[in-house]
Image: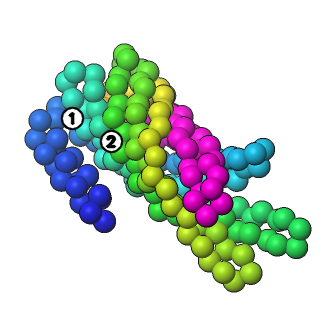
Amino acid sequence: MKKLILILVAFGVANIQAMETKYGIGYSNIDVSDNGESIDFDNIELSYHVSFDNNFAAEFSFSTGVSDTTFVAGNETVTWDGGNSYFLKGIYNINDTFYVSAIYADTEIDAESAGVKLSIGDEDFGFGLGANYEIPNSENIIRIGFESYDFDISATNTSASVDKLTLTYLF
């Protein structure tokens, strides 16, 4: 919670110097893979985007799962769900269309098996890239992006790769 408050304060201060702020709503698909096995989640994202005048931007996103995935291993059935996740992005716009980003991800995944619920969380840094499409006669933007970071599962001492594909409408 302290991190969330600090991030919101930082965006409030950044908003004073910002040229432009936008809000966003989007869909993301998060794919978590390890040793050839993968699970994926559909998420809805809300974001706050701040553009600066030197091709740089910052964005805070909140993501929550809207569908779950069932995984069967032997007699065990495990239901995986994308929990609440937070992302802080530093974005560099290469030109009006393409961008690259550095990401701080605080990701949570929920699992349930035989009535036992478990929540796994991790924080990590990653990278992203994507494209913006400015809607004609409007200041609104449609963005498609790809992000990648690691997700460490401390209980099993393994690290999974997370690939995230997003489609966002910034208004």
**Residue at (16% x, 41% y) in the render:** 14
The residue sitting at the front extreme is 157
Q: Is 147 situated left or right of 73 in this image? A: left
Q: Secondary structure at mark 2?
A: strand
Residue 59: which numbered mark, if any? 2
Percent coordinates x, y for residue 103 in the rendering? 41, 39
Q: Identify the coloring.
A: rainbow
Q: Mark 1 or mark 2, which has the lower sequence index?
A: 1
- Give the camera-side residue of 93 and 23: 93
Q: Is 136 one of the magenta-colored residues?
A: no
Asked if disc 1 and disc 2 are in contact, CB closer than 8 Å, the reply is no
The label number, if any, that marks residue 20 in the structure image: 1
What is the x, y in percent for residue 89? 36, 39
Decide if residue 23 is in sight here.
Answer: no
Mark 1 Cα shell of 10 Å, populated few (<14), some (14-19), many (≥20): few
Q: Residue at x 38, y 17 (%)?
A: 94
Query: 65 or 138, which lies in front?
Result: 65
Where does the image place residue 141, in percent across and percent down from the top left? 38, 33
Amino acid bearing label 1: Glu
Question: Farthest top residue?
Answer: 95
Q: Is residue 148 magenta?
A: yes
> What's drawn in magenta, residue-wise?
142-171
Instruction: Tell me the amino acid under the disc marked 2.
Output: Glu
Q: Position of residue 114 (x, y in %)?
A: 74, 81
Q: Check the image and name the residue furthest to the bottom.
A: 115
